[in-house]
Image (spheres, rainbow, N blue to C red):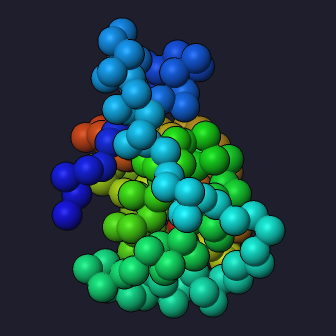
Amino acid sequence: IHENVWLVGVSKVLPMYAKVGVPVTRTRERDFCQRKLSLPKELEPNFSAKVNIQDCLRALNTPVLERKSSLVQSIFDYTRGSHFVSNLPPGLYFRLCHSMEYKFVEKGLEVYYAGDPCDDMFIVLSGAVRALQEPLNSVYCRTVDLVDKDTFGEQAITRPGSKMESQVIATE
């Protein structure tokens, strides 16, 4: 199911290749990458359409293997406004939306702990979370509050296999 997912290390890609995703010297391979990372015309983001959170949640609560393109499109359109994901190639992000899962976290509970393997990227759909930066340092701890459509755990895409460097707690 995930054989067509492309991971792009953003620190390794020059801006001139951002739409392609992978710097390739041969034109034929570059064209192939461009086609894979772009969306078919019928699946392009529709920013004029008003996608609400209920449509997105309905799509996210549909089992991954049963999701049709229209449901994936709801997830894509609702979450595309995030700063991090808006910089991903649309084709890559659409494929990531297909495998997204919904996770509800009660207020006061941790989403994950520092040191956990970074296997997932998170998008705040509703509510707020507080990220504790450097929580293992007993002297100093920075906090960052994240709200609707903010992302965290991006290193699951940019640095797969790394450890979580923060601890995130649901605040709303």
Q: Residue at x 33, y 21 (%)?
A: 28
Q: Is residue 101 above or below residue 142?
A: below
In the depicted structure, whether residue 106 falls above or below residue 28: below
Image coordinates of residue 20 in percent, x first then y, are 47, 29
The residue that appears at 70% across and 78% down in the rendered structure is 51
Q: How many numbered dots are placed on residues in this image?
A: 0
Query: Toward the viewer: 49 or 121?
Result: 49
Quarter location, residue 30: top left
Image height of 106 relative to 39, above or below: below
Residue 29 spot, x, y in % from top left: 31, 23
One can see residue 74 in this view: yes
**Residue 103 x %, y %:** 44, 78
Q: Quadrant of the N terminus?
A: bottom left
**Residue closest to the eye, 35 or 125:** 35
**Position of 135 relative to 72 (above/below):** above
The quarter in which the C terminus is drawn is: bottom right
The residue nearer to you, when weighing 50 against 171, is: 50
